[in-house]
Amino acid sequence: MAALWLGDPRRKFARAFAKAAAQAPAGPLADYYAAGMPTLDAAFSEAELACIDLETDGLTPRRDAILEAGIVPLAQGRLQAGQARRIRFRPAQALSSASVAIHGITDDAAARALNADEALAQLLPLLAGRVLVAHFAQIEVEFLDRACRRALGGPFVAPFVCTMQLQQRWFGGKPGEIVRLGALRVRYGLPHYAAHDGVSDALACGELLLAQIAHKSGREPTLAEMLRR
């Protein structure tokens, strides 16, 4: 995926989006692409975004599963916490004890969740036509693509803003350095939230993005200038 974001992100994303749309079978994935691309030349305060966090049973998409997606809309520069959604995915295999200790989703809770195709059918309409916001967005990029390929038979392509990458690009830092969401929030004086909950992490990511934009000097950025590269 990374190669898609070199150079002009608008042109390269448009090509990737069109190619993925052509491969999408009828159903939720085709409907997602039919909603069209967001306008990447729009200023941040004029745009509709969706902050997203995935809780997974590990960090390897080809082996591990999405367990939960938390989504918080962000429109016209305001977080819409009242419209937050939590969608649980039922994994195909038993959860590892190590991951349960992190995210707190037990086998019993996972057994009551939706199959991946049903969960994605609920999730994709919440993402359609929006730029997605995540912290260390590579996780969301890879897991969503893998899940859609497995369950729906086609690739997932979306424009992403990565708050971890923005921090490095706008305010400096070591290239490739992984800085946790909570640690960055402390730098901006944002309150502590319990980690590893899809909805609270999506909200925390959105609040961090708003703080980063407030602290950035110069004019308001466009979506294209904010995209993950």
Image (cartoon, rainbow, N blue to C red):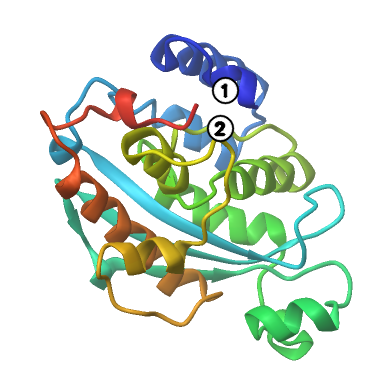
Q: Residues within 10 Å of mark 1 (few under 14, many from 20)?
A: many
Query: With respect to residue 109, does 159 lie above or below?
Result: above
Give the left or right position of residue 218, taking residue 61 as reference.
left
Residue 166 lies, in percent from the top left, at 38, 39
SS under mark 1: helix
Residue at 57%, 22% in the rendered image: 21
Is residue 2 in view from this perspective? yes
Q: Residue at x 71, y 43 (%)?
A: 152
Closest to the observer, 225 or 67: 225
Q: Quadrant of residue 84?
A: bottom left
Kindly identify which numbered label has been placed on residue 30: 2
Given this view, does label 2 or label 1 mark the residue nearer the observer? 1
Dot 2 or dot 1: first in sequence order is 1
Q: Position of residue 205 (x, y in %)?
A: 38, 59
Q: Is residue 145 left or right of residue 98?
A: left
Q: Label 1, on which residue? A: 21
Residue at image coords 39%, 26%: 36
Lateral position of residue 191 relative to residue 194, left or right = left
Q: Secondary structure at mark 2?
A: helix
Q: Is residue 143 above or below residue 129?
A: below
**172 and 66: which is toward the camera:** 172
Marks 2 and 1, how far apart at CA: 7 Å
Residue 134 image point, x, y percent: 46, 51
What amino acid is at disc 1?
Ala
Q: Are marks 2 and 1 in contact (CB under 8 Å)?
A: yes
Mark 2 closeness class: few <14, some 14–19, many ≥20 residues within 10 Å: some
